[in-house]
Amino acid sequence: MSKDRFLGEQLMPFAVARIRSRENTLLSDQDLKNLMGCQTYSECIQYLLDRGWGPTANNTPEELISLEKDRLQELTESLLKAEESKYLDVFRITDDYHNLKAAIKESYIQKEVPGIYMDGGVLDADLIRRCAADGEFGALPSEMAHAAEKARDILFRTGDSQLCDVIIDRECLESLKRSARSTGNELLAEYAQLRCAAANINIAVRAVRAGKDEEFLKEALVECDTVSPSRLILASRNGLDEVYEYLEQTVYKDAVDAIKESPAAFDRWCDTRMMQLIRPQKYNAFTISPIAAFVLAKNCEIKSVRLILSGKRNHLPDEKIRERLRESYV
């Protein structure tokens, strides 16, 4: 019996049933259309408050989104024991590595930068900040510490912030894979694979456009079951058309048009693909998948709301906002 199935059988009587009831609180596609249809920014805020966001109209958009993230974290913590909640660390790891990049760069410029840290990670942001300031990373997980030491050394020796990011981003993806693999859960494994594949594709396309060499790609790309780094490197020698031709032979052939359009369009394609994968999981009650699916769906909802609010606040045309919206889970 897999760890995931054993966990699911313990969760079955309470946690999965409760998470299914919370699906009704998610914004539907129609809700997002209604939000888009609001004439003013203040109407958007009021619509969200009416749908359970909030608590008050005095909250800024950033505070509203932060509140929703906090509620999601509180919900999962109320459903899972501490050792069980580690199954969902795969969704929080990226915040840790974002904080690591921010901390190393902050230590490099020797100046505090307000508002650059995220509080949704597995590790305490202040711990990461102190480690970077001291140049001592022993308090961090070993693989993360190794990447941090390498990235910090390169930044301080060369000032190359891009290479610093590449090193940390790659280890972030490796950490995602390890975390997902440790759960034994198929949905989380697919999530990690999609994240790794999307990163490889975006890196390869940007590298070709920027004229980066193969050594850069070897440093940046991560092993992935669905998109081969070696094949991407080989294709990149002959330009973007060859990269697209290779992708046409993979499970990402339907994404090529979005990749050609823009990174944002491809990001939307990936989120839509993930939504298609997670919808059936709500009925898979003997694993943690329904809870993982809800977390993914809520994060996607938050991304869409942030996009709409940002667009309304900056007076972007509705069609520009609409073309980047994600599908709803419900």
Image: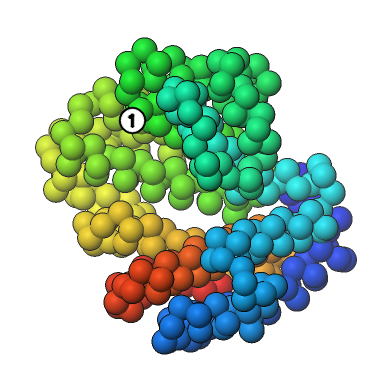
Q: Quadrant of the C terminus?
A: bottom right
Left-right relation of 247 to 124 = left
**Percent position of residue 143, x then y:** 57, 23
Q: Residue at x 38, y 57 (%)?
A: 267
Whether 281 is drawn above or below 210: the answer is below
Whether 35 is drawn above or below 285: the answer is below
Toward which corner of the image does residue 27 lie, by quadrant? bottom right
Front position in the image: 97 or 5: 97
Q: Residue at x 40, y 74 (%)?
A: 312
**Percent position of residue 136, x then y:** 60, 15
Q: Which residue is mark 1?
A: 162
Type of amino acid at the residue the image marks with label 1: Gln
Left-right relation of 166 to 53 = left
- What kind of element bears circle 1? helix
For mark 1, does the 10 Å Cα neighbourhood hold few (<14), some (14 to 19), or many (20 or more) residues?
A: few
Whether 186 is drawn above or below 234: the answer is below
Left-right relation of 209 to 227 = left
Q: Residue at x 46, y 78 (%)?
A: 41
**Percent position of residue 93, x then y:** 59, 41
Toward which corner of the image does residue 45 lie, by quadrant? bottom right
Q: How many marks?
A: 1
Whether 314 is drawn above or below 230: the answer is below
**Percent position of residue 175, x then y:** 56, 34
Front position in the image: 134 or 35: 134
